[in-house]
Amino acid sequence: MTEKEQITVAVELEKKDVVSLMFYAFTRRIAFKILMVVLILFCILFIPSRIMNGEPITETSDMLLLLIVIFIVLMPLILYFTASREYDSNLRLHEKQIVTIGQSEIHIKGESFESQLSWSKVYKFTESKKYFYIWQSKNSANIIPKRCLSAEDIDLLRRMK
């Protein structure tokens, strides 16, 4: 493998990176998307009619509406605090990692761990606006912030997908 066929990057994760992963993973699920569309449509259809008619929140449907609004507001907070707690408790996330990505494998070395992954066993590889994610399973991923990569490395990584 020539040097141009692999990328070596130093990754130092911050809490915001883990929070972004949590939001990305949660909001990309189809069940979440369907639920949010249904909840937002429900709110759009029923809130204006209740306000215009000056009706008090006493009926069961009104209480359900209130619970939906609370859910929509609380879900991002729950995700943030869950990701924050994960970052604070997992000391490996605080370590500087050297990630080498080649055509056939990915090598990750931290201060207290080392792992080698073959591309053939990677669950999924995705890209967001600020990150690349190497998914080990449906719920676990290695994060590579684009801020750690050069423009050439980003292009090469996109071609490796």
Image: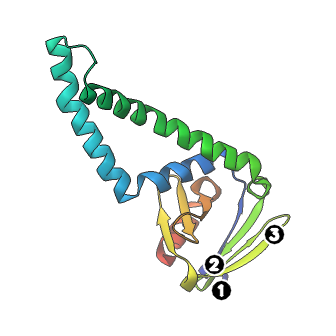
- State the separation of the CA atoms marked 3 and 1: 26 Å
Residue 109 vs 65, above or below: the answer is below
Q: Give the mark toward the camera: 3 or 2.
A: 3
Residue beneath label 1, please?
2
Asked if residue 106 lies left or right of residue 47, the reply is right
Secondary-structure class at tag 2: loop
Sequence-earlier tag: 3 or 1: 1
Tag 2: amino acid: Gln
Q: Residue at x 32, y 48 (%)?
A: 35
Residue 86 vs 57, above or below: the answer is below
Q: Give the mark toward the camera: 3 or 1.
A: 3
Cβ atoms at labels 3 and 1 below 8 Å apart: no
Sequence-earlier tag: 3 or 2: 2
Q: Residue at x 55, y 69 (%)?
A: 135
Please give the label number shown on residue 6. 2
Asked if residue 90 lies left or right of residue 55, the reply is right
- Percent position of residue 144, x then y: 61, 61
Secondary-structure class at tag 1: loop
Cβ atoms at labels 2 and 1 below 8 Å apart: yes
**What colouring does the structure picture have?**
rainbow
The front one of 4 and 45 is 45
Tag 1: amino acid: Thr
Q: Give the mark toward the camera: 2 or 1.
A: 2
- State the separation of the CA atoms marked 3 and 2: 21 Å
The front one of 161 and 34 is 34
Residue beneath label 3, please?
113
Tag 3: amino acid: Phe
The front one of 40 and 50 is 50
- Percent position of residue 156, x then y: 53, 72
Q: Residue at x 54, y 43 (%)?
A: 79
**Residue occupying the far top of the picture:** 54
